[in-house]
Amino acid sequence: MNLHIRPILAALRRHKAGTVLITLQIALTIAIVCNALFIIHARLANLSVASGVDEANVFVIRNQWADLDRTTPQIDAQVQADLLALRQLSAVRDATPASGYPLEGGGWDNFIMLTAEQVQPTTDAAVYHGDEHFLDTLGLKLIAGRNFRPDEVMVMGAQQAVTPPTVIVSKALADRLFPDGNALGRSFYAMAATPSTIVGIVDTLQRQGVDQWSNSHAGQSLVWPVRSDDARGVYYIVRAKPGQLADAMREAPRALYAQSRLRIIDPVDGIQDYATLRHKVYDSDRGMAILMGIICVVLLVITGAGIIGLTSFWVGQRRKQIGIRRALGATRRDILHYFQTENLLIAGAGVVLGAILAVGLNLWMMTQLAMGRMPLLYVLAGIVVLVVLGQGAVLAPALRASRVSPVVATRTV
């Protein structure tokens, strides 16, 4: 017996409330699941973002001074003594002072202009202060130009502001400022009246932060040849020799305290390797991905349960109708296909409405939460998931309906 769409639509019109509710449930599920999958993918992608750092061998020491009354020359002398002590350790390859470090660790941003008269900035860049050891210590790959010379490194106290004439930039910033690819030797202005000339370009140098603003300007960073001698403290970035990270992390605090006890290094998080730093920095992304995953699973389970419950209810109400169809020659497969087709029609209406809601929700999040545009691939994936879920959920009630005997049609006669 061939089943047609018309009797199915007639049956659905007799159950308008249930049909509308399950359609809306499917629509809301697909709207939320599509955007949740997009968020999950974006968050998980963040976990693998390259920092440019030799993360397997680099660690950071957060050094605070116990004596805040020292002058900038005194602090600079202490910093240089500390660095000499660190570099002399057998497990250490190199060390550098810094105002911040990739993924986390203070620092600041600067608006970048190509001319002194420019009103609107061309872009934004994370600013690092580092000496001639900065690139080697972090393991940054110099792809063009040169490193800083020792005579170019300037000293800057906490209340000073300097704009060095030379600068090293990341490839992302160089390409943003000079898309023609000829950034080396050219100048720009970083919120200052004097220009800085690009003397080197590194392949990758991630920003200090991982928030939405940082993501929208990902990898746009610059390094000025400055040794920050802040009276409050300084970051010491240390690169261990391969395989000797644990030894270097154990020896470094001892070497620093041997130079001066007038410092504070927190025993809990005052010294951290980059694997720990990355895990901590991306905790929120990891947590958000897990939360969104749980929401997706819960919504899909609830939607599947709703379809099973509603179909089971309809099967109970239609037992006599099913029996009559069986008595008139309908096979078990015909009954099974009937309910599968009925579910497909409901799911089809739900996914069309859900796709519209999914795009609308994404547009709202773009304006309110600074999120990116969701590719339509996520909507298509959501449609496939909901259609498959619907067909899977209706299968058990439909199989039960297909086993209704033709005798049922005569029991109430």
Image (cartoon, rainbow, N blue to C red):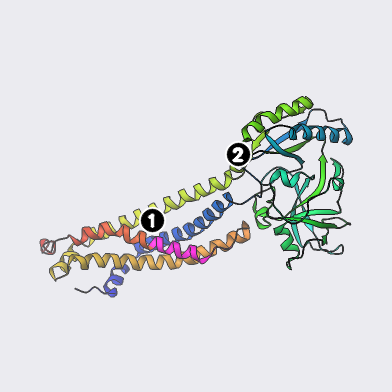
Disc nearer the start of the sequence (1/2): 2
Give the residues drawn in magenta, as a range: 373-386
| Labels 1, 2: front one | 2
Identify the mark at residue 276; answer none if there is no mark: 2
Residue 132 location, quadrant: top right
On screen, residue 232 above or below 292? above
| Number of marks | 2
**Residue appearing at x 75%, y 29% in the figure:** 256
- Is 24 covered by the magenta stretch? no
- Residue 21, percent across and down? 39, 60
Whether residue 168 is visible here, answered yes or no, is yes
Residue 174 location, quadrant: bottom right
Q: Which amino acid type is shown beneath numbered disc 1?
A: Thr
Q: Which amino acid type is shown beneath numbered disc 2?
A: Thr
Say which of 379 and 282 sits in front: 282
- Is 379 covered by the magenta stretch? yes
Residue under numbered circle 1: 303
Split into 4 quadrants, where in the image is the C terminus?
Answer: bottom left
For the stretch drawn in magenta, the main secondary structure is helix
Crowd band around label 2 with a 10 angstrom C-alpha radius: few (<14), some (14–19), many (20+): few
Q: Is residue 268 left or right of residue 109?
A: left
Identify the mark at residue 247; answer none if there is no mark: none
- Residue 58, percent across and down? 66, 40
Say which of 136 and 402 sits in front: 136
**Residue appearing at x 42%, y 65% in the figure:** 351
Q: Is residue 234 left or right of residue 36?
A: right
Whether residue 266 is visible here, answered yes or no, is no
Q: CA distance from mark 1 to mark 2?
A: 39 Å
Residue 386 location, quadrant: bottom left
Asked if the residues shown at circle 1 and circle 2 are in contact, with their CB atoms under 8 angstroms apart, the answer is no
